[in-house]
Amino acid sequence: MSPDIALTSFLLALSGLFSIVNPVGSALIFAQVTAERSAAERAELARRIGFYAALVMLAALWAGAPILNFFGVSLAALRIAGGLVVAASAWTLLSAPEAREARRQAEAGPEPGRGIGPGSGDGRSEGLAEVAFFPLTLPFTTGPGTIAVAIALGANRPAEGPDRIGFYIGASLAAVAIAGMVRLAYGSADRVVTLIGPVRARVLGRLSAFLLLCVGTQITVNGVADVLGPLIAAAHRG
């Protein structure tokens, strides 16, 4: 296993997932929608959301691409489509970040019969566990965009061999690191609101979105190279 592959995969996955999850910006909304909860309950929610977020990202990273391959989607097509989806998501973040923030706040808000304030559920632990997974993990923290990014990253894996092992180790560590950031940011949401504020969070979000656009473009380029490479080589041999 090459340490360089693991490090490169870690940095690529970390930048891509951080950009789409945006733990700092999400913490600002988390602070608003859980304002009526006690400090102990919010800390418990942060711990559970971090754990669930890690499971969602790891499942998409490890199983997403193989499942699509099972249905006959080639690796090159998966890379191209995944890269385009990631790039489109990044462009939306760059062009209309306020709209995305409003949508995520609506996703995290209470639904009829399913509140996130005190007293949700039949008991404290059961209520926290239910709310922590839905809606605060899915779709608020790790929604369809995050899953698409994780699948696209998984599609960018090397061929069978030691390099693939290094890729999965690096990418999985990045997913766990992002989940850890989510837990820390949500657990310190009040301090994040005071320290960062909504304006700085938007600036950070735009910078992250541009980085995500670059990640999506790179994944697409890799997929196009997979398609055109054999054709160009065949043309040269002819």
Image (spheres, rainbow, N blue to C red):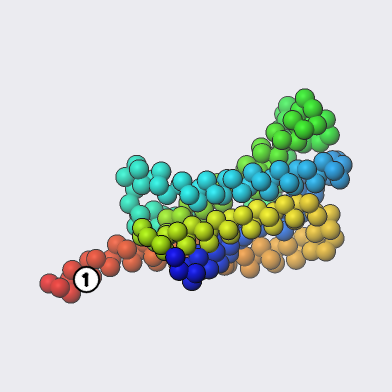
* Residue sitting farthest toward the top: 122
Give the amino acid at mark 1: Ala
In this picture, residue 90 sits left or right of residue 228: right
Residue 141 vs residue 87, the one in the foreground: 141
Residue 186's place in the image compared with 116, above or below, is below
Question: As drawn, is 21 to the left or to the right of 164?
Answer: right
Q: Position of residue 121 (x, y in %)?
A: 76, 28
Percent of width and height locating residue 195 = 83, 64
Measuring 41% from the left and 43% from the top, which residue is drawn there?
A: 67
Q: Does residue 223 appear left or right of residue 151 in this picture?
A: left
Identify the image quadrant of the C terminus. bottom left
- Using the image as rendered, state which of residue 229 and residue 154 is in the foreground: 154
Of residues 86 and 92, the one drawn nearer to the viewer in this rendering = 86
Residue identified by numbered label 1? 233
Kindly indicate the quadrant of the structure image that contains residue 1: bottom left
Figure check: 180 above or below 106: below
Residue 223, percent from left and from top: 37, 61
**Residue sitting at 71 percent across and 39 percent down?**
132
Extreme-left residue of the structure? 238
Q: Position of residue 82 (x, y in %)?
A: 44, 55
| Residue drawn at (62%, 65%) of the image | 208
Category of crowding for the residue at label 1, using alpha-carbon neighbours closer than 10 angstroms: few (below 14), some (14–19), many (at least 20): few
Q: Tell me if I can see residue 93 in this picture.
A: no
**What residue is rendered at 64% in x and 58% in y?**
177
Residue 60 shows in this picture:
yes
